[in-house]
Image (tube, grey):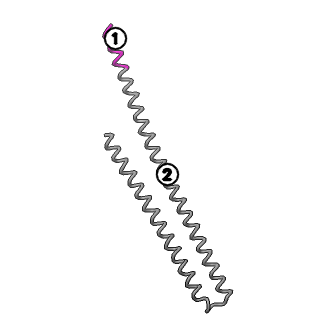
Amino acid sequence: ARDTERDRQRVREEALRRDLESHVAFLQDTENKKSHDLQQEVQQLQQSSHALSRTSLLQLQRMKEMELEVASKDAELLSLLAQIQEQKQKHLQNVITIEKAAKTATRATVDLEVLSAVAAIKSQMSH
């Protein structure tokens, strides 16, 4: 029964880990693509600068730079989210460990009570 519970727990933890890794990888891929696309747009704007007035070009470049800054902040937030998810998983593992320890302590208490009762019976039988 303990092995079955451990196996189930291992499966749950592995599923959580895979889910977290998959989610973080997806978010990072999305942010990398956004950043790459924005960088390409900035390059295209720079290449077509001869067709735009200097003022308009500077305004568009500043807009794209701001978008890149936002993408950078998004990446930072994703990193923090990944750290929070890891802490949640560690917390869950700690809770599971505590629950296992409590079950073990309960079993030990029951074992001691049984041994105490057996000792009392033996003591009474020897008198």
Residue with the mark numbered 1? 124
User: Where in the figure is residue 2, as x and y percent of width and height?
Assistant: 33, 40
- For the point 56% across and 63% down, which residue is it? 77
State how far apart marks 2 and 1 are (Cα).
54 Å
Q: Residue at x 34, y 11 (%)?
A: 124
Please state the extent of the stretch shown in magenta in the rendering: 116-127
Is 75 in front, or is 117? Answer: 75
* Position of 11 relative to 108 (above/below): below
Dot 1: element: helix
Q: Amino acid at mark 1?
A: Gln
Q: Mark 2 or mark 1, which is nearer to you? A: 2
- Give the quarter of the image for residue 50: bottom right
Say if 82 sits above or below 114 in the image: below
State which quadrant residue 23 falls in: bottom left
Q: Quadrant of the N terminus?
A: top left
Quarter that holds the C terminus: top left
Q: Residue furthest right?
A: 55
Residue at which label 2 appears: 88
Q: Please report the residue visible at 38 percent of the width from the left and 27 percent of the height from the top.
A: 110
Q: Position of residue 49 (x, y in %)?
A: 61, 88
Give x and y (percent) for residue 59: 66, 82
Q: Residue at x 33, y 46 (%)?
A: 7
Marks 2 and 1, the one that precedes in the sequence: 2
The spot of residue 36 in percent (x, y) is 51, 75
Decide: is 81 above or below 29: above
